[in-house]
Amino acid sequence: MIEKPLLLIVGATASGKSAFAIELARALDGEIVSADSRYLYRELDIGVAKPTEAELNLAKHHLINVATLIEPWNLGLYKQSATKIIEEIQMRGRLPILAGGTGQYIRSILQNWQVPSHGPVDQLREDLETIGNKMGFDKLHEMLDAIDPEAAAKIDYRNHRRTIRALEVILSTGKKFSDLRDKDKPPYQTLTIGLELPRELLYARIDQRIEDMIGKGLVAEVQHLLELGFGPSLDSMRVIGYNEIVSHLRGEISLDEAIALIKRNTRSYVRRQANWFKPTDPKIYWLNAQDPMLLEKALDLVRNKFGITPAE
RNA sequence: GCCGAGUUAGCUCAGUUGGUAGAGCAUUCGACUGAAAAUUGAAGGGUCCACAGUUCAAGUCUGUGACUCGGCA
């Protein structure tokens, strides 16, 4: 059986992925599957640089505005939905284009992760957290090491959250965390294109974009969310750009300080993002985001790999 | 001009009774399987303003100079 094609677009935030994906979708009769954990939520808009309604109408988009902050999504749900949507697009004979900045989500598709099927258990998480705070998280990690040494070896004892997750799965399934996770080859023919931009330039673009967000009314957006009762205690609201503005609205910091913090935190986010998709990765075709021939080069890659040519 | 305070990492600053230096932020690199814009680990980086003196030994003490910031004329 011939595997169907899947095109992936990766790159740092503000590198121009969204617009590039739209161009490709239009040229190749494709549909875009977003791989951005913050585009999932209807309520988040300006601060996450979500494409506008008009932009979204330029091509068919999936997995944008499909959730609400009160019912957060996560890796497992994303993997299930994205897989289903990708296959539906392929069955329609169109090209799925997976584009976004959430490295974990993209890799779960690219490496066909078998995600432990047990979702979060809030009460258990809280209990484990309490135990950790009382006895020390190193004790919690020792516990994990006793039950599942393979998982413990991969998790730093100082990383409370991942320690808790591993124990959560073990305690609620009775099975080892390390046995429930697996990876494989994806059932698609894949081509990954990365958009690259020199760090310095990227940082400058980010600074500009954040100024623009303020101009577009980010403060009012956050204010409105707070009025609707979406507070920073929601995991889904723990977003760069929102946390800082909340602090400002509470009078803890000035607007200028909040803006400086957003810039700083976004830069650090860019560096963390880069860990998922590295310039040295031989499977990624890196193209300069500023190259005037960008689209042509990408279409060449698609033609060579998939044999698909742009519709006239 | 006089008096006082200061000059140490890219930035803001610590540096105890003299034993050639630290923190936070920044920068860079790494981990990641149902919170991932989350969580988390590590590294690089200093003629300690200059010169002279005391001392086995000076970021630290003394002197002179330069620069910065206050205050008074």
Image (tube, coloured by chain):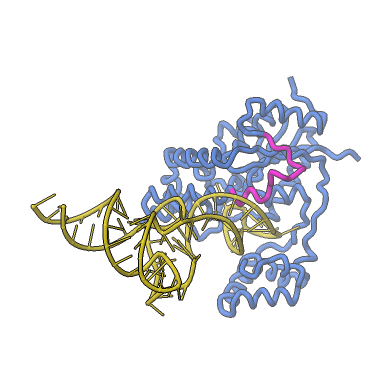
Please state the horizontal and vertical placement of residue A84, each as a whole percent of the image.
75, 46
Q: Is residue A138 magenta?
A: no
Residue A182 seen in this snapshot:
yes
| Image hue for chain B | yellow
- Residue A122 vertical placement versus B32 (above, below): below
Please state the horizontal and vertical placement of residue A194, each as a whole percent of the image.
68, 39
- Residue A127 vertical placement versus B70 (above, below): below
Please state the horizontal and vertical placement of residue B22, each as a whole percent of the image.
49, 65
Q: Residue at x 79, y 40 (%)?
A: A190
- Residue bounds of the magenta highlight: A271-287
Task: Pick whichever, A123 or A75, lies toward us.
Answer: A75
| Image hue for chain A | blue
Among the 4 quarters of the image, the one containing residue A159: bottom right
Task: Pick whichever, A65 or A98, lies toward us.
Answer: A98
- Residue A107 vertical placement versus A57 (above, below): below
Q: Residue at x 77, y 40 (%)?
A: A88
Asked if residue B33 lies left or right of residue A271, the reply is right
Among the 4 quarters of the image, the one containing residue B12: bottom left
Task: Pick whichever, B67 or A44, lies toward us.
Answer: B67
- Residue A25 vertical placement versus B72 (above, below): above
